[in-house]
Image (cartoon, helix red, strand yellow):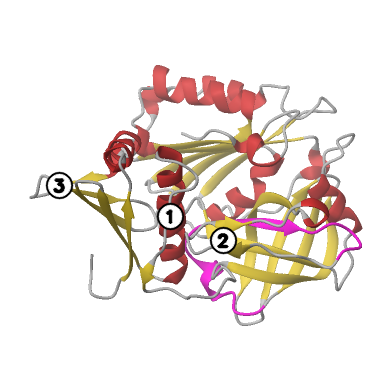
Amino acid sequence: MTSQELTAETVIRHQAAAVAVRGMCRDHEDHRLPVERGNEWRFRMHYGSVILELDDQDLKIRVSAADETDLSYMRMIVAGHVREYLDSAVAIRWSGDGGTSSIPVFFREITVMSSERISPHMQRLRFSARDIGRFASGGIHLRLLIPPRGRKPVWPTIGEDGLLVWPQGEDALTVRIYTIQAIDVEKGFVDIDFVLHPGLETPAAKFAQTAKPGDVIGMIGPGGEHVPDGGHLILLGDDTAIPAISRILRELPEGRTADVWIEVDGPGDILPLKAETASVRWLFRKGRPAGTTGLLTDAVRKIDPKTLPEDIFVWSGSEFTDFKEIRRIVRKEWGLAKDRQLIVAYWRRGAQGDDARSEAA
């Protein structure tokens, strides 16, 4: 931990406190750090650090992070694990840095500015918002919170345990993960691209097609992937991954290259991408249902892993079936290390919400 980091602490008294410690060690073994004391455990995670100290039935937890957003994420992650390992009624109260407001520091209310059909199967919405500088770094994804039509939005709050409290019943929100396609902090707008699957009635796509200037929704974030760390990238994805691939290529550092395969329905779905140092191949479904063609998997099978450079990184975002097979090929047949790949199920046929993005590599 550096002197610039923010910290928060909680002490949990529970007869099974050691169970929580064992659970953290089991589930986050890859993130454990060396320690000098037998009753202390340290972890370095994506958003910050955790220190656990166990004294009989007292479990002292200290989280640290670079800013309020990441600190809030850390409180949320740890509190969620504690309730999972122990029980949902265990008392968790944080002290230290971080705001005491019930409004999540990572929440923004956003307003539709414009809507544009940029391809037969893609709708781009531009949203205005205040204070979005934090959304320009720390990940390229966010969660959109779509309130019920005709009702005043009721947004989530933060409980004293650090966990989100979601509106229920008639105020329940539709929550979906999307990529920040573009962001302009000075002008205060965010562009989000929505895939439109013909014949599928999805709440987010319906909102995108009917949204009008002045419509209000919410967003929380950022999170998720950054530009992959590799001298040469292999990028694979279907329509849902185009915004992420676009961001990755746009932010690709000088001197790095990429081979890209993107599956869409047809030539009309081709979108302009920054590709000065990338080779982009578009694969066409030609009317076949998305997620059923195996085009991305076939493209991976044609790659000879012996020809790949040592600094290769494989990134893929696709339907669940392609995700599973691409992951199998890259891991089992190619033998590529886990830190040289990020293979994600962006959606799953017949599934909605987070269930559609249930696994990643």
Q: Is residue 270 magenta?
A: no
**Between disc 3 and disc 1, whose residue precedes?**
3
Q: Which mark is residue 107?
A: none
Q: Amino acid at mark 3?
A: Asn
Residue 253 can be seen in this image: no
Q: Amino acid at mark 1?
A: Ala
Q: Which of pointers 3 and 1 indicates the residue nearer the eye?
A: 1
Q: Observer-nearest residue: 167 or 334?
A: 167
Give the Cα distance between marks 3 and 2. Answer: 34 Å
Q: Secondary structure at mark 1?
A: loop
Q: Which residue is mark 3?
A: 39
**Between disc 3 and disc 2, whose residue precedes?**
3
Give the Cα distance between marks 3 and 1. Answer: 22 Å
- At x 87%, y 61%, the residue is 211
Q: Which residue is mark 2?
A: 221
Tell me where the magenta segment starts and ends, as one range.
Answer: 130-151
Q: How many C-alpha atoms fall within 10 Å of the one at disc 3: few (<14), some, or many (≥20)? A: few
Looking at the picture, how far across and down is residue 206, in whole percent? Answer: 87, 49
Looking at the picture, how far across and down is residue 63, in whole percent? Answer: 32, 60
- At x 47%, y 54%, the residue is 226
On the image, which quarter does residue 130 sit in?
Answer: bottom right
Q: Which residue is mark 1?
A: 91
